[in-house]
Amino acid sequence: MKKRFLFISCEQAYLICDKAQYGEANLWERFELMLRLSWCKFARAYTKDNCALTAAIHSSKDKLLTEIEREEFRKNLERLIHKQPQH
Amino acid sequence: MLDHTIDPNTWISNYADYMFNYAITRVNDREMAKDLVQDTFVAGLKSMENFKGEASERTWLISILKRKIIDYYRKKNSKKGQAEVRVGYMNEDQEGDWLEERVADPFSKDAQDIIENAELGKAISECMAKLPKKQKQVFEMKTILDYETKAICNELGITSSNLWVIIHRARITLADCMKKNWF
């Protein structure tokens, strides 16, 4: 997609917004996003949802198990089950 | 006749998230919470014969986990030379009778906080479970485990652009799911 100076597409705005959630959007990208947000209601709606999602995850991310950790539990438990004496 | 049955093969899928959430809310240390949950599964397996079916499997496992948490604080306190644990321990022969004891939780936090936290965690977990495998893996590495973009790209053999597209798709699915279930 051709990028015009200062004006970014909605898709580009979404990607910058995603990067911004992780603090990885640079100053110029943030400026372009702000400009887009000033007139685009779709980008504003996406940003609002995205920020709400970030806030929700941030408040409980330490309490979430990842798939890797769940798999680790599963392997350990399966190993233990197989070790159990059969009755 | 037993009201409840026990099946260790379903413990991870049914209770791992809930138990981890329960443990980490009380010990505030991710690795320790994982160890406590793991120890609970080991103790549960060893004492399955003591499960009388009077309460649900989850209640039984949680009562073991409570014991493990008390044990953790007891050890931690005794290391500091200031043991303050009030709950009396039973002997080893009684291991597995936790349910019948119905241990009071001395580390119980504000009930509303715990319920809200647990509910939010559950909603996010359920929404994340709906993501395709690759999206889930990338999203977890980036968002939950806080891996650097470069590290994820190296590990999974993807480009930075690919990563952001995957993250974008995952976030759209999650935001949509959370809108329906939480926001």
Image (cartoon, coloured by chain):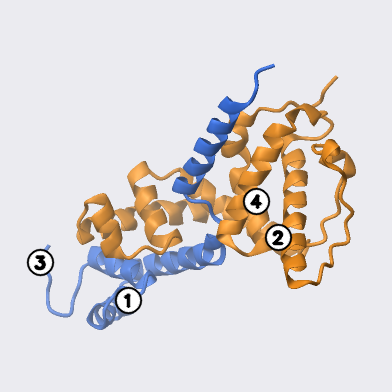
Q: Quadrant of residue A39?
A: bottom left
Closest to the camera, between mark 4 and mark 2, is 4
Residue for badge 2: B114
Secondary structure at badge 3 equals: loop
Q: Residue at x 84, y 31 (%)?
A: B54
Marks 3 and 2 sit apart, C-alpha to C-alpha, by 49 Å
Horizontal relation, residue B76 to residue A40: left or right: right
Pick the front one: B66 or A86: A86
Report in which chain the residue with disc 4 lies. B
Spatial CA distance of label 4 from label 2 is 19 Å
- Residue occupying the point 58% across, 32% down: A80
Judge if badges 2 and 1 mark residues of a common chain.
no
**Label 1 secondary element:** helix
Residue underneath mark 3: A2
Please determine whether, in this image, residue B95 is positioned above or below residue B104. above
Q: Mark 2, chain letter?
A: B
Question: Mark on residue A37?
Answer: 1
Q: Would residue B169 be found to the left or right of residue A68 on screen?
A: left
Marks 3/2 same chain: no
Q: Which chain is orange?
A: B
Amino acid type indicated by mark 3: Lys
